Image (tube, rainbow, N blue to C red):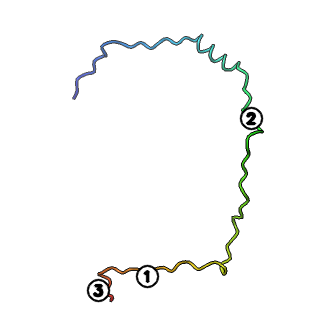
Amino acid sequence: MSAPRRPAAFRIEPEPQQKEDSTARHAASEAAPARKPPTVKADLAVVTPAEIDVFDEPDIVAAEPPPAIAPRKRSLLGSLFFG
């Protein structure tokens, strides 16, 4: 089928992990005091939306009627057969 695999020209050794550095970083992150969460400044402008009545329906009797709809155009073939 295919030729047997040959090893790479050179071997890549993984870098040795230093346990001291990783434990020191881990201990430093645990020992750090918790930060206070950022607070909202009171002097910033606060925008409140205007009150809108969503369920307010317009008076149907007083409203003007909708515009008239143009009649549907028939195709040329339809007008030949159905007049």
Is residue 49 toward the left or the right of residue 14 in the image? Answer: right
Q: Quick one: quadrant of the N terminus? A: top left
Q: What residue type is labelled 2?
A: Thr
Give neighbour class at mark 3: few <14, some 14-19, many 20+ (Cα, 10 Å).
few
Left or right? Give the position of 24 relative to 42.
Answer: left
Give the CA distance from mark 3 to mark 2.
76 Å
Labels 3 & 1 near each other (Cβ < 8 A): no
- Image quadrant where one finds the C terminus: bottom left
Q: What element carries label 1?
A: loop
CA–CA distance in space, label 1 to label 2: 63 Å
Q: Kindly indicate the quadrant of the structure image that contains residue 61.
A: bottom right
Figure quadrant of residue 64:
bottom right
Q: Distance between the residues labelled 3 and 1?
A: 18 Å
The residue positioned 30% from the left and 13% from the top of the image is 9
Q: Provide the secondary structure element on which disc 3 rests.
A: helix
At x 43%, y 82%, the residue is: 71
Q: Which residue is drawn at 71% across and 62% down?
A: 52
Looking at this view, is 11 or 56 the one in front?
A: 56
Element carrying mark 2: loop
- Please, what is the three-letter code of the amino acid marked with disc 3? Leu
What residue is shown with label 1?
71
Q: In this view, does 40 lie above or below 70?
A: above
Residue 2 percent location from the top left of the image: 22, 27
Within 10 Å of disc 1 (Cα), the crowding (few <14, some 14-19, many 20+) is few
Residue found farthest to the right: 42
Residue most extreme to the bottom: 83
Check if mark 3's residue and mark 2's residue have beta carbons within 8 Å: no
Question: Of the residues shown, which amino acid type is indicated by label 1?
Answer: Pro
* Residue under label 3: 80
User: Mark 2 = which residue?
Assistant: 39
